[in-house]
């Protein structure tokens, strides 16, 4: 716990607990949101088969997760942490140009 608090530059155990709860909720929430998105795109195991459907669904969950993480963080009062977390993460994977001033 000390290492996470130091790495994320937080001091409160309560804030750390909220952050971990947000990560847990957002994982399930993004998978839940991906279901209507795949339906909207008319993707199902019946239409494209499981070998296409599941990898496509996983690829859809990734951007949905990135979008919903600050939203869920906002609901728990941790928007600033998750916004900075997203900017740092996206810049590491080569999408930092999205946040340049």
Image (cartoon, grey):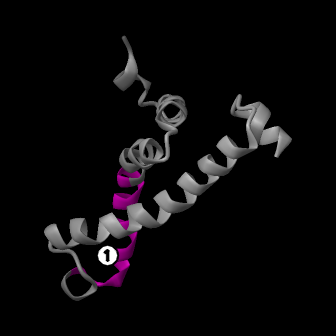
- The crowd level at tag 1 (other Cα within 10 Å; few <14, some 14-19, many 20+) is some
Residue depicted at 71% across the width and 32% down the height:
10
Looking at the image, residue 29 lies above or below residue 62: below
Q: Residue furthest top?
A: 101
Q: Position of residue 56 (x, y in %)?
A: 33, 66
Q: Quadrant of residue 47?
A: bottom left
Quick one: quadrant of the C terminus? top left
Q: Which residue is mark 1?
A: 53
Residue 34 placement (x, y as % from top left): 31, 66
Depth check, front residue: 9 or 43: 9
Rendered location of residue 90, percent (x, y)? 47, 34
Task: Decide: is 42 above or below 23.
Answer: below
Apparent side of residue 73 relative to residue 101 in the rendered image (left or right) = right
Q: Give left or right: position of 40 versus 51.
A: left
**Image quadrant in which you'd find residue 92:** top right
The residue closer to the viewer here, 93 or 76, is 76
In x, y percent, where is residue 3? Answer: 82, 39
What secondary structure prevails in the magenta region? helix
| Residue shown at the point (42%, 47%) measured from the top left | 75
Which residue reaches farthest right?
Answer: 2
Residue 55 forms part of the magenta stretch? yes
Residue sitting at 84 percent across and 40 percent down?
2
Q: Residue at x 38, y 49 (%)?
A: 68
Q: Is residue 36 magenta?
A: no
In the image, 83: left or right of 59? Answer: right
Secondary structure of the residue carrying tag 1 is helix
* Total numbered circles: 1
- Which residues lie in the magenta part? 48-64
- Report which quarter residue 32 is drawn in: bottom left
Horizontally, is 87 left or right of 16 in the view? Answer: left
């Amino acid at each position: 716990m000390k290492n996470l608090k130091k790495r994320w530059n937080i001091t409160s155990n309560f804030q750390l607990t909220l952050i971990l709860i947000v990560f847990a909720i957002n994982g399930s929430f993004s998978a839940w949101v991906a279901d209507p998105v795949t339906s909207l795109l008319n993707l199902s195991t019946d239409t494209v088969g499981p070998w296409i459907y599941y990898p496509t669904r996983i690829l859809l969950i990734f951007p949905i997760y990135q979008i919903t993480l600050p939203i869920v963080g906002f609901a728990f009062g941790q928007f600033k942490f998750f916004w900075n977390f997203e900017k740092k993460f996206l810049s590491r994977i080569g999408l930092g140009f999205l946040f340049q001033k």
